[in-house]
Amino acid sequence: MTPLPKGRPTFCSVDLAALRWNFRQVRKKVGRHVKILSVVKANAYGHGACEAAKILTASGSDGFGVATLEEGIELRKGKIKSPVIILAGAYPEQLDQLLLNRLTPVICELAGLRRLEALARRRGISLNFHLKVDTGMGRIGFLASQIDSWLPQLAKLKALKLEGVFSHFSDAEDVGGSYTQRQLEIFCRVVQRLRSAGYPPALIHLANSAAVITFPSAHFNMVRPGLMLYGVYPSPEMVDEVALKPVLSWKTRILQLKRLSKGSSISYGQTFVTRRESLIATLPVGYADGYPRLLSNRGVVLVRGKRAPIVGRVCMDLTMVDVTDIRGVRQGDEVILLGKQGRDTISADEMALWAETISYEILTSISARVPRIYHS
Ligand SMILES: *Cc1c(COP(=O)(O)O)cnc(C)c1O
């Protein structure tokens, strides 16, 4: 267990046993023969990329997906040796770093394919890549509908080797949705075409967490779960399909307690005025920590197992909560921003609802200022 931070008591507690557990649930869903590319982009959704990757490697993860080259390098520095795919695109300027760190680029368009091929040839090296196909996400990737224009270009490759082909769902949370089904069909046709043209990709992958849980026909021979590894459900409808355990809790302690008379205003802009004599606790956390400002006069924290509402605006470094109705509150009491205390829990989904966003954004927004403490 990493020791608690000295001083400012705002930190995230990361439960590595829960991470291991969630990985095992992925394994159960996909079976032994499907590879698992654990997605650890954005600092493993805020959990700490290297720490998460170590645990996942030991649990049997076959590789890692990150968004950027820099994230890939971080994993290499953290002594992660398994394959790492740069999912959100690699740039020709990064070729040296790609090679040096044995990272696998994703190629999304012909110009990129040609440039990387030319560079690799000039160096006299060969490089594996994954081909991204756009089957309806409208983001990066070769358009499936234009396969006749790009497929013949693969014949010209000498230095680049097609290792994998993949696509990404736009709406896999919509269980059984027809759009997801259509994307799958389009993807299958692309894979067929690649095979019959003589480029059978070794790795074929499409499933994010939602599809890992509810869409076995999209598993192929590799899956790319992110969110579910961290114990968060892609959709509330999936809670009966798999038992996940939240990995991250966000905690702090009461910095100051004060009794304010009726009619006192709290925080910037006087958006909250006490309607009674109130006991107000100031917490050492704010939007610079990634605590959403939209939680102003809206969010809730747990103190002594009870819910205390945020009053006034969330500031950059401090936030006030009303603890008038909670008995025995003391300065220094533990406060749960995200996670479980007593019998109550604040989930990333609940916080996301208050902040008009999704769990992904809540987790990835917790800033570098907040220390992550690991325990198993
Ligand atoms: C983020 C991402 C994933 C993981 O998605 P989850 O919904 O978190 O499981 C998979 N594939 C790609 C290309 C991604 O960008």
Image: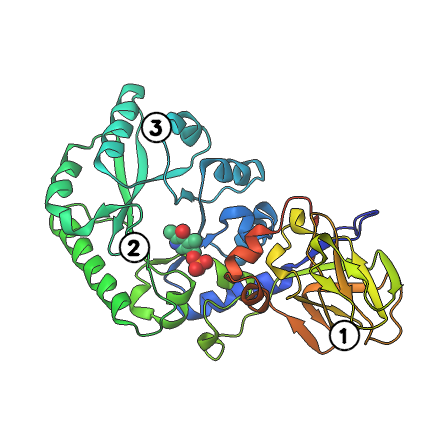
Q: Amino acid at mark 2?
A: Met
Q: Are marks 1 and 3 in contact (CB under 8 Å)?
A: no
Q: Look at mark 1 in the image and give the residue it sits on.
A: 305
Q: Amino acid at mark 3?
A: Pro
Q: Look at mark 3 in the image and give the residue it sits on.
A: 92
Sequence-wise, the earlier of marks 1 and 2 is: 2
Q: How far, Cα to Cα, is label 1 from label 3?
A: 53 Å
Percent x, y for residue 369?
68, 44
Q: Is residue 197 visible?
A: yes
Q: How far, Cα to Cα, is label 1 from label 2?
A: 42 Å
Percent x, y for residue 232?
53, 66
- Give the image quarter of residue 68: top left
Percent x, y for residue 145?
15, 51
Left or right: 108 with respect to 349? left
* Residue sitting at the far top: 122
Task: Please tell me the numbered disc located at residue 137.
Answer: 2
Percent x, y for residue 92?
34, 28
Compared to 78, does 59 lie above or below? Answer: below
Left or right: 197 with respect to 123? left
Compared to 374, does 327 lie above or below? Answer: below
Q: How far, Cα to Cα, is label 2 from label 3?
A: 24 Å
Q: Nearer the viewer, mark 2 or mark 3?
A: 2
